[in-house]
Amino acid sequence: MDLVPVHMQTCIGMAAVSGSHLNNLNAASAIGFTQDACSVNRLTAGYYMNGMWPKPDLFIGAYNACDGIAKNTDLLRTLYPDMPFYHFECPYKETEEGIKYLVAQLEEMIEFLEQETHRKLDWNRLEEHLGYALKMADLHRKISELRKNVPTPLRSRKVPELELADFYFCGAKIGSDFYEVVYEEALKRVKNGESGIANERYRIISPYVYPTYVWGLVDWLEKQWGAVHVSELFFSNWGTQELDPKKPLEAIARKMYAHPIVGTQGGSLDTLVPNIIEDAKNYKADAMIWWAHRGCPHGCASINSTSKAMHSLNIPVLELDSDYVDPNFEPESRMKYKLNTFFEMLDSRNL
């Protein structure tokens, strides 16, 4: 439809990587946002209060990961009461009835977009670009399989970079081409027995994602301790649903459940705990780091269950207090101190 989409949560995460977000967090606090709320959602409010978001022509809200994202829609309704909105709901569990419900909503959303923009959806282009999106998902699964090798072929930060490409370029040829390059790079290293880092000593899995404002911390872990992330449920574990681009709306609906963020954030412990146990075994994990984003009740509520599962496998766990974008809660220096203590303990176990 030749519309320009802006994925707010992704833009906010990248703002934290660049360090341009602190004034906007303060702006959210100034209008009464509690610091116990998810910092991603606080930052959304701050950007709007500081006038840093261009006013959109319309807004698509979605509830398919966490309650906070849904509440962002309420916030935007308040800030822009005259702006057209469509709110998209994703049922909690994947069922055939739920898929039909999602397809009906997609049809409603298309009608909404066509009415508001006076542009018709090109179904042939949708099928073409859905093909690129499904290829990206398939390559992501293949890359995850290659990461199971010892040594693992990719650095810790590579998969979050893949996820950012998925957010920005899902369904675009440039996104598919990027995934292809990463897959070929990983495959070549596996064939040559090469590691993604200089000295792999510890293989780390994590159900959640490390803070955006200290991506350099995982680089430091690789250099200081030879500790490399080999799997992150939040990014790595794409579902295996069969998706047919000839049925584009059904494929999009099923793809929502296949996406690792929805599967991890929106799923139940009945799914999460077996997945983390399977990952620990398949990826030959030496330890688990729970990057415990304090504003995420969905994630933190599952720490106890996943930690118990790891302890049953005799795999050490570090529950590391953190925040996804706000450095005021847990500075890098304190996280480094806790990480050093944890890996010193691991070293002593191996003596």
Image (cartoon, rainbow, N blue to C red):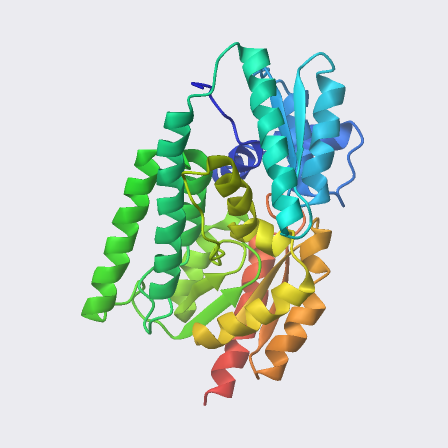
Q: Is residue 235 above or below residue 286?
A: above
Q: Is residue 222 above or below residue 164?
A: below
Name the foreground residue: 178 vs 176.
Answer: 176
The furthest residue to the bottom? 351
x and y percentages locating residue 80 in the rendered image: 70, 16
The furthest residue to the left? 192
x and y percentages locating residue 296 in the rendered image: 69, 50
Q: Indicate the quadrant containing the C terminus: top left, top right, bottom left or bottom right.
A: bottom left
Q: How many marks?
A: 0
x and y percentages locating residue 143 in the rendered image: 35, 58
Q: Indicate the quadrant containing the N terminus: top left, top right, bottom left or bottom right.
A: top left
Name the foreground residue: 39 vs 61.
Answer: 61
Answer whether residue 327 is visible to the viewer in this image. no
Image-quadrant location for residue 300 = bottom right
Name the foreground residue: 163 vs 199.
Answer: 163
Q: Residue at x 37, y 46 (%)?
A: 136
Q: In the visual, does 5 lie left or right of 165?
A: right
Q: Residue at x 56, y 74 (%)?
A: 277
The furthest residue to the top? 118
Q: In the visual, does 82 lie left or right of 132?
A: right
Name the foreground residue: 272 vs 224.
Answer: 272
Answer whether residue 153 is visible to the viewer in this image. yes
x and y percentages locating residue 301 in the rendered image: 73, 60
